[in-house]
Image (spheres, rainbow, N blue to C red):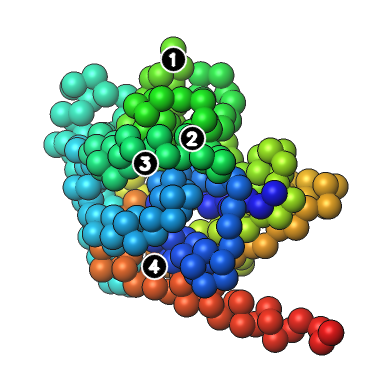
Amino acid sequence: MKALVISGGGSKGAFGGGVAQYLQEELGHTYDLYIGTSTGSLLIAHLALNKIDKIKEVYTSVNQSSIFNRRPFLVKRDKYGQDQISINHFKVLRNFLRGSKTFGESRNLRKLIKKTLTPEEFQELQNGAKDVVVTVSNLSMNETEYKSIKDFNYEDFIDWIWISCNYIPFMSLVRKNGCEYADGGFGSMVPIKEAIDRGATEVDVIILETEVMYYNNLPSKNVFSLISNLHGFMMDRIEKQNITIGKYVANNHDAIINLYYTPTVLTTNSLVFKKEKMKLWWESGYQYAASKNIELNEIKPEE
């Protein structure tokens, strides 16, 4: 049984889409199981449908308004050429006065998900042999949960994809089934273990981060950049722990895992969605997977 796992990573998901496109279209990899966290959850249904051009078009045409109906921050370019976020005091205050528990709201993202994944496509996947699983964090129960397309109706599964991507406190906190839910990355950034627990014997893993840290964060300019840096630190720790555990479980189950990291730092703030950059990242993901495959073929021992 073969699985594809795609980690969280916000706008960097475009790079992951390019890698997955090469794996499926050029190498002919087919998967029985697709598991995604956060931005990975947005990709996997269409990858399972082999509708790669469709999801590529979505990823390379989104902007901030595609995600946020109430965007809590402003984006400015600093003297180092990096995008820095600063608080939009008016919108955040208005959000709190409306009773929201988060700085911003991402209901436009749910609308985009529903528009992109049709009921007919959902039904095709639910009735098919492939399983599509998204990762969510249950904050009420302090648990990571994995939601299979086989277990829910259309509207519920759209909710779970959306919830998997909600990077609080910048995006929506969702109450569902009596519990509060948020981004799956808070519990499992790279769900390799879950893939193996579900029976996978070979797992292709797309990790939307470099294997080695190449930079230091700039000093925090405001409360938003501080929270962003703090979340980045926590996610990095969770990611490394997930990979370590995944490798350990794979060894114990004689499973093969193939890791695809980003070769360079794409962005220091994955909440910034710029379609020009995401187009480049999709193509660079495709080219990276191609070059990695060439390298692997070159080092294979002669038969």
Q: Are marks 2 and 1 in contact (CB under 8 Å)?
A: no
Q: Which one is earlier in the sequence, the residue at label 2 or at label 3?
A: 3
Q: Which one is earlier in the sequence, the residue at label 1 or at label 4?
A: 1
Q: Which residue is mark 4?
A: 282
Q: Is residue 268 visible?
A: no
Q: Are marks 2 and 3 in contact (CB under 8 Å)?
A: no
Q: Which residue is mark 2?
A: 127
Q: Which residue is mark 1?
A: 177
> How many angstroms separate mark 1 from mark 3 (CA)?
25 Å
Q: Residue furthest top?
A: 178
Query: Residue 4, image x and y in percent?
Result: 58, 53
> How many angstroms separate mark 4 from mark 2 (CA)?
30 Å
Q: Which residue is mark 3?
A: 121
> How many angstroms separate mark 4 from mark 3 (CA)?
23 Å
In the image, what residue occupies the spot 46% across and 25% down? 152
Front-most of residues 79 and 233: 233
Of the two numbered discs 4 and 3 in the rendering, the one whose residue sits closer to the viewer: 3
In the image, what residue occupies the spot 48% across and 50% down? 48
Q: Are marks 4 and 2 in contact (CB under 8 Å)?
A: no
Of the two numbered discs 4 and 2 in the rendering, the one whose residue sits closer to the viewer: 2
> How many angstroms separate mark 1 from mark 4 (CA)?
36 Å
Please rate how many residues cluster around mark 1, counting C-alpha atoms within 10 Å: few if below 14, some from 14 to 19, many from 20: few
